Structures are given as C-alpha cells and as structure tokens.
Image (tube, rainbow, N blue to C red):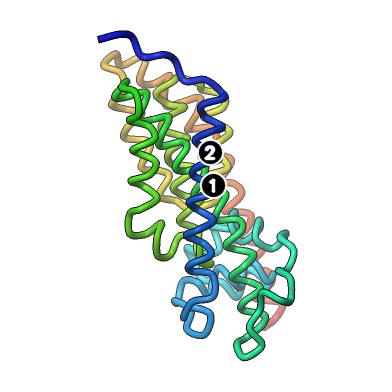
Amino acid sequence: MPPIPPVTLRNTLLCLSLFSLISVGIAWWNLFGPSVERPRPDMVHYLALADGDGLAAVPVPYRYRPWTPWLAARVPDPPPAWLDATRPLDRQKAHFRFAVVNVAGLALAATGLSLLTRRLVDRRGTGLVGGVLFLTSYHPLTIATLPMVEAWSYAFLAWTLWLLVERKHIALGVVFLLGLSCKETLLLVLPAALLLDSNRGQRIRQVTAPFVIPLAVDGLSNWLRGIRTKVLSTGQG
C-alpha cells in the first residue's frame, strides 16, 4: 500500500468548507422550528446568559457555560424578512444568533474529528467520512444548532484530543482552558491523557502543563464568579 500523504492546510480548509455548508443546511432546517415557542428547559438558561440577565438568575451548572451564549450575544439580528411576525420575534432573533455561532462550532467539531480520525486510522478518506458521519448523527441534526452549547463542546473535545495525540501542548492548554468555559464534559479528555503514554514520567508531564494549569485558572474563575453571584443575590435581597 502506498504511503498516505500528510494532511495539508489546503485539505483541512476544504474539509472545513464542506462541513460548514452541511452545518448551514442543518441550522436552516432547525432555525425556526417548534422550540421557538416551546424551548427546552436548558435552552431557557442559555438564552438568559445570552440576554445578560445576570448569573444569579441562572442555576448551576449552566452559569459556568458562558462561551456559546457570550458568542451568540455578539451576533447581529437577522434581516426582518427572515422573521415570522406571527411568532415571538425576540425568540426568533435569539435562535438565529445561536444558529450562526453553532454552525461554526459544528463545522470546527467535524473538522477536528476528521483530523483525529485521519491521525488514528491513517487511511485516505477516513477523516472526511468521520466528519460526515458526525454531522449526520442525532444530536448535530436535531439540537446542536439550537440555543444549546453542544456544538462547541464537541468542537473543543475533538480539537483537544487531536492536539493531545499530536503533542502540541501549548495549543492544547489554550484550547482546554477555553473549552472549560463551554461545558465541563471536556474533563473527559483527562483519562485519555493518562492512557496515552505507558511511561509514568511522560504521563505526568502530559497532564501537568496542558491540563492542571488551565484547571486551576478555571477553578479560580468559577470561584470568583460564585462570590460575585452571592454578592449580587444578597444585594437584590
């Protein structure tokens, strides 16, 4: 069997473009569905974060997942022609803003999974197949582009695992730190880091620099956020 050519930036960008087109189609299909009038309970909390209602109004653990709502709050409103005047306009605008952000998250998640699959299997076409299979699975097709945080949590998980396998420790630490503000499920990467190397000393180095420091920073940030929430709650009381 001839050697598999290395992954190039051009191929990665082509995959990202393809996955972006698929993600846009998924988002458009789900954009103004029934959840506009009947949002899931967790959607209500993410919408509150995006609206800036204050941390005291958002329960744990949702208040510790600000990444996607923070991005969604910075997306402009859709054109008025795209809105249905017979349905809640504010909710439609919020769904659009989350959809834009989550399209990017889904496309990056599929691209990261494509790189990881190609790295582990090392066969031509496996990365593309892995990304397409991911985008056509249940959660990406149904809820990932709604006011949820799953799309970006998938992206952070896929890229963290790929950076871990590639031993790009500085980039891994940065992505891991950002990902902790998206969803705490990223902590599932830690067992993978411990199992990656058989040498005990290598395992310790593998975990300490890219994971322990970001965990300490995130823990301090959450602790300060909790104190601020208590102060605000006391003041309002």
Residue type pointed to by label 1 = Ser
Residue 83's place in the image compared with 191, above or below, is below
Q: Helix or strand or loop: what does disc 1 sit on? A: helix
Residue 124: x and y in percent read 34, 23
Placement of 124 over or under 190, stated as above or below: above
Report the residue marked by disc 1.
Answer: 20
Q: Residue at x 47, y 43 (%)?
A: 109
Residue 156: percent from the left, percent from the top?
49, 42
Please name the amino acid that badge 2 sits on.
Leu
* 235 over 206 or under it: above or below: below
Which of the 4 image quarters holds residue 116?
A: top left
Front position in the image: 228 or 19 = 19
**Which residue is found at the position 53% from the left and 49% from the top?**
21
> Along the line of sight, which residue is nearer the eye, 53 or 79?
79
Question: Looking at the rendering, which quadrant does residue 196 occupy?
Answer: top left
- Residue 145, position in %: x, y? 50, 61
**Quadrant of image for the C terminus:** bottom right
x and y percentages locating residue 75 in the rendered image:
71, 60
* Residue 227's disc number: none
**What residue is shown at x 55% (from left), y 36% (from top)?**
175
Q: CA distance from mark 2 to mark 1?
A: 6 Å
The residue beneath circle 2 is 16
- The answer to whether 233 is drawn above or below residue 109 in the figure is below
Crowding near pointer 1: few (<14 within 10 Å), some, many (20+)? many
Q: To which quarter of the image does residue 102 belong?
A: bottom right
Count every numbered label the image shows and give the total: 2
Residues tagged 2 and 1 counted as in contact (Cβ below 8 A)? yes
Nearer to me, 36 or 178: 36
Q: Quadrant of the N terminus?
A: top left
Residue in the image at 46% along x and 34% along y? 160
In front here: 96 or 64?
96
